[in-house]
Structure formats: structure tokens, C-alpha cells
Image (cartoon, grey):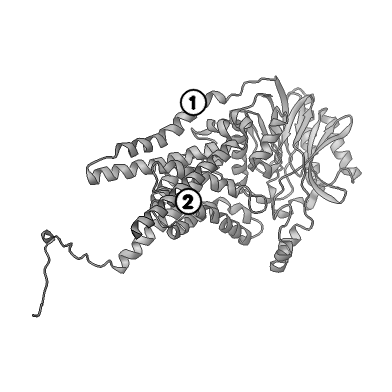
Amino acid sequence: MTVTATSVDESDGVQPRTAPESRGARLLRRLVPAAAAALSGVLLYVSFPPRTLWWLALSAFAVLGWVLRGRNWKAALGLGYLFGLGFLLPLLVWTGVEVGPGPWLALAAIEAVFVALVGVGVAAVSRLPGWPVWAAAVWIAGEAARARVPFHGFPWGKIAFGQADGVFLPLAAVGGTPVLGFAVVLCGFGLCDIVRLVAEGRRTGAVRRGAAAVALLGVAVPVVGALAARPLVSDRAEDGTATVAVIQGNVPRAGLDFNSQRRAVLDYHARETERLAAEVEAGKVARPDFVLWPENSSDIDPFANPDAYAVIDSAAKAIGAPISVGGVVERDGKLLNEQILWDPDKGPVDTYDKRQIQPFGEYLPLRSLLDAINKNWTSMVRQDFSRGSEPGVFTLDGVRVGLATCYEAAFDWAVRDTVTDGAQMISVPSNNATFDRSEMTYQQLAMSRIRAVEHSRTVTVPVTSGVSAIILPDGTITQKTGMFVADSLVQEVPLRSSQTPATRLGILPEIALVLVAAGGLGWAVAAGVRGRRADDV
């Protein structure tokens, strides 16, 4: 018997053949998630300063959740990497402003690997009940790893640092950057789950109420928690006030050669201090209790160069107040990025050595390898800086001022231990001249705003070339300078000694969230193993 044609009716219990998927459809099915992952990473970048579009972070994570949910590990790795590149490439473009695209591309490519691994974790836990909670914890675990390795970590781009203008900001006082970041990511993934469940309900005509309730809680709890935490945010003075002066002297030129005229940089800051002193004497400005100069305001070692010593001493005597001076000092064969407490009567009386020094900026890991690749890179950092070992807290006219020099502001521990060591306010002396007019200075300023709320302290940001600022303990910027101008800021600021829950808890919230992530991943792995065994039976 020869059969020339076969017609199968679906009513016979046999499923009809489906038409084979075209090559174009297969390509589209792969490209759409990839494009969505990369574009949602860009969306996350746009949520960061200098823009105030903090809420875009929620949309970015909602899209990321949709892209990763239910994927196998290979697909999740690739999609997570695309998300990381979409976010980090534009965020870190300032790292290549003066040295070319090589270091910038390498840094973004390496840091995106952490995001790719997080993508695998998010995909794994996305099959669990209440997956937004597990997935948000996995993201924070990835940030925790990125803040520690390699080369002592690079926490730039923590989700918390994009939320200085957001409704979730008070959560920084509850549990620091991990809790603030967790709330944002949880809310984004919760939005993703709500949209998914609504679409599923329309398709099937039924809504899974338990899953919907969990998804709604994922959005509501962070918002309610932030509102409940508002009483922790206050700019009320507890220990009186102090009148502080922030000096921005400016630099002769931007770029890597900003310090080729090191004496000029020092002279500029001394000149601006003396100009302020004249205004004080004329009664135009309140007399400051102390003065804060930025990092690298004296790249000439005043301990080894009498002329630099004389310039600083003259400025301190003119203003009649102690000055915290940012200097580069060589002591016992070690090169140190140092803050020097300069008394107008006694001269230098105390020092703080920067502890978290910047890899490839202040020291070169893998120096021999880099020298073989490009000698120009190693010539930029001829001698490595050494690390300090003690928290920096100066007593300036009776006020305890904590010091977190520039890059240190990105590290939770480097700011917190100044407060636990008794700081009543915080100063973040910085030098951003090497990054020209890039977004770097605004990203760093946002970090200082987060730190102000996290520890409920006034934060001052003296910068060589801008943007310098004074930030109240509630994260509000009350004064700021422009970029590449000489200027000074004088203000009476509140002093505080109480500690927020974030200050008291320290690293514990981060450890708790990492354990939550580990628990979710363990559950997902175990469920996968059980599923495979069931299929084999």
C-alpha cells in the first residue's frame, strides 16, 4: 500500500506538526534578549549622576529580570555580560580621558565579568518562589565581591551610589550601601514579576494570588521601609556647630600633567586661602574655625622643601585657623598620599596617610607585565605609593573631623571607621583634575551624599579643580563650586555624635544578604538536581 498524503486531525489525539522556525525568527529570538540586556545596562547608567533619573534603575532591573528569568547558565552568562558592558562602559569612560581607551575598555570588560556571574545566579534563583528576593541578594553578593577583588576591589558603580536623589535614600542609614542597593534591585525585580504575572493571568484567565502577593511585597516593602527610615535622616546639630571653610585653588591645567607645575598648585591654594582671609578681616565672611584643602594641594613635600613649608605656614597664619593640607610626602623611603594638620602657631602637628590607594593610579600591580605591554603606562607611575594603616581623624579647633581621601569614599569601611573612631563630621579631600570635565566628579560627589546619610554626618568635599561641596547630614548639598575655578565655601555646619544603625552594624547587613544569596543559590542547585533525578527515573 502506498500512501501519497497524510492528513492528521488534532481531534484524533495526535498533535499537528509545527512549521519549522525560520532562520530569521531564530536570529530574532536570540537578538531581542541580547539587545534588551545591553540597553537595560545603558538605562542603569543613565540613572546615575550627574543626572537625577534615579528611578530608571527600577526599569533597568525589571528588564534584566525579564531577560534572565528561566535561562540556562550559558545564556545567562552572556546576557549578564552584555548588561554589565551596557552599564559600565559609559559609566567608566572617564578612566580613559587622559590615558586612551585601552585601560578604560580593560577595566569595564573585567568588571562586567562580575555582572555576568551575577546573571548566572539570578537565572538560577529565578525559578524559586519569591525569586526577586533571592535575585536582589545575588546582585548585592556580586557587588560585595567586586568591592574586594581584584587589587583590593573596585566598588564604583554600586547601585546605592546612583540613589542620592531617590526615595530609597533613607535606607542608607539603616544598613549602608548594601541595604540601599538591595531595596532598589528588589523593587526592580518585583516590578518584573508583577508584569509577568499580569500577562500570565490575561493569557490563562487566572492569577496565582500567592505569587502576586509576593511580587507586590517586593515592590511595596522597599518603599515602605524607606518611608519608615526617614526619622533616621536629620541635619539637627547634636554637638553644636562649626564654621568650616573649603578651599578650591584650581590647577594650571587639566589632565595628567596638572601637577607638572606643582608649585603653582600649592600657590593657588595658598592664594585662595589668603583671599578668604582678607574677606574675613573685612567682615564679609564669617571667620572659619578650620580650613580644608584638597588632596594633592601640595605635591611638593613641605617636610623636605622649606619653600613649600613657608607657603603653607603663611596661609595658615593669614587665616588664623588650622588647615588640613593634602600633600605628597616621602618618609623612610615610602611615598605617601598624606593629609597634614597644619596649626597656624605650631606648624604640622598630625598626619593621615591614605589607606585605600588606587591601583594603576597610585600604584601599579603587575608592573613588569604592563611595562612589557606599554612603557608609557608604567612611566606615569614611577614609584608606588604606600598604604597608611590607621583611620584618619583630625582634631581641628576641638572638632573631630574624619578623613576619607578621594578614592576611599567608594569603600564602606574606609568611611565608617572614621565615625566609629569619633568623627563628628567627615571630609573627602579629592583631586579630580586628571579626569578633566568628565562625569567622574559628579559620581564621586554622589557617593559623599550617600555617606552623609549613611552615617548622619556633615560631609565636606574639597577638590583641587571642582566640584567642591558642603553636604548636610541629610544628603543635601548646600553649597558647591564650579569646575576649574578658584573658589572657597564657608558655612556653619552641624556636628553630630550619634551613630545610625548602619554605622553600628557595619558589615553585618552585607554578610546577611550574601548568606541569603548563598541560601537561594543552594536551594536552586538542589532543586535542579532533584529535577534531573526525577527525569531519569
Residue ID at (54%, 48%): 142
Helix, strand or loop at disc 1?
helix
Instruction: Name the mark on residue 121.
Output: 2
Query: Where in the figure is residue 480, as x and y percent of width and height?
Result: 64, 35
Provide the residue designation for mark 1. Answer: 228
In the picture as drawn, the residue positioned furthest to the left comes out as: 1
Query: Where in the figure is residue 185, as x and y percent of width and height?
Result: 47, 42
- Does residue 396 appear to the left or right of 522 in the view shown? right
Q: Nearer the viewer, residue 515 or 254?
A: 515
| Amino acid at circle 2 | Gly
- Residue 163 visible, this orientation: no
Residue ID at (54%, 56%): 113
Residue 479 quadrant = top right
| Badge 2: residue crowd in 10 Å (few <14, some 14–19, many ≥20) | many
| Amino acid at circle 1 | Ala
Q: Can you say whether 344 is above or below 436 in the image?
A: above
Residue 417 quadrant = top right
Rendered-image quadrant of the N terminus:
bottom left
| Badge 1: residue crowd in 10 Å (few <14, some 14–19, many ≥20) | few
